[in-house]
Amino acid sequence: MFLTPGDPATLLVGGSRDPDPAVLAQIHREYHLDDPFIQGYLHWLGNCLQGDFGKSLVYRDSVAGLIGTRAADTLALVTYAAVIVLVTGTVIGTVAALRGGRTETLVTTLTAGAMAVPTFVMAVLLIWLFAVQLPWFPVYGSGEGFAGTLKHLTLPAVALALTWIGYVAQVTRTAVRAELRSEHVETARSRGVPEHAVIRRHVLYNASGPVLAVSGVGIAGVIATAAVAEQAFGTGGLGSLMIEAASKQDMAVVQAVSLIFVVVFVVINTTVDLVSAALDPRVAQKGAR
């Protein structure tokens, strides 16, 4: 953004072709637009540590206020999509591994196809099918109230989730399959342990480690691609705010939203690593080596 042509200060003077140089110079000083990249970034980061994300050039409002008004929409969308990914992906993968045969082949084919479709393409297909051909769901805004929000966010959540459902289902199927062939499962069966207990205590529990790991990556991926769905469906979350700000060189907004996404990404992956180590101590032992 620092290398792109144009002066973001002109946004504050209405985009005039011949703005007053004195006014532009004052804006540059106020927003530190003339500072070198490193100096400007350190100045912004120091203010962030004090809870000040700066002021938006485009919206002429505090960045913290803008984030506060849009964070709820993104949180609702990401949570909805994450639930779809975790529930659908693990159930499909588990059923495919336990049943095998044609069911496993069908699931493998469908999930591989889902992984190959980008989010923006899936968004267009869902809009065409469920909003144009079958007008079941709205395609703009985030709705009001629980029922309205759920209905408005269904299509963007599904568009976000489908790719990661494929990944979670594939990993779940592979992990459950590996546990079904393991020695401790064969030993439990030879001792007369009921099959449902073998599946629950030995297969699913031991397969939960890799499933949890890929689920964490999937949720992080949902967060990373949320902006695509927000733009396609006009839900107005943080992702669409960042895209709008980037197109208008509103650096303070872009930096703040990017920082939030990075922090959330790191927190999710760290949490997944800790939980995986708690479920399977072998993970921690491998990391120590």
Image (spheres, rainbow, N blue to C red):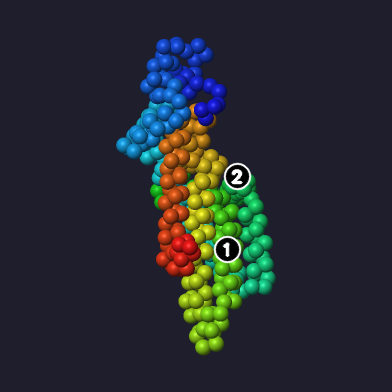
Query: Which percent across, then down, holds residue 197?
Result: 48, 80
- For the point 56% across and 50% down, the residue is 159
Camera sees residue 92 = no
- For the point 45% across and 44% down, the residue is 261
In this orientation, which residue lies closer to the viewer: 188 or 95? 188
| Upstream in sequence: badge 2 or badge 1 | 2
Against 129, residue 50 (above or below) is above
Count of numbered labels shown in the rendering: 2
Q: Amino acid at mark 2?
A: Phe
Disc number for residue 120: 2
> What SS does tag 1 mark?
helix
Against 112, residue 141 (above or below) is above
Disc number for residue 171: 1
Q: Marks 2 and 1, Cα distance to the nearest angstrom? A: 24 Å
Against 29, residue 257 (above or below) is below
Disc 2 or disc 1, which is closer to the eye? 1
Camera sees residue 235 = yes
Query: Which percent across, then down, holds residue 134?
Result: 60, 50
Query: Which percent across, then down, holds residue 11?
Result: 47, 22
Q: Relative to residue 5, is residue 32 drawn left or right?
A: left
Residue 66 occupies quadrant? top left
Q: Residues within 10 Å of mark 2 (few under 14, many from 20)?
A: some
Query: Which percent across, then down, holds residue 2?
Result: 51, 28
Q: Residues within 10 Å of mark 1 (few under 14, many from 20)?
A: many
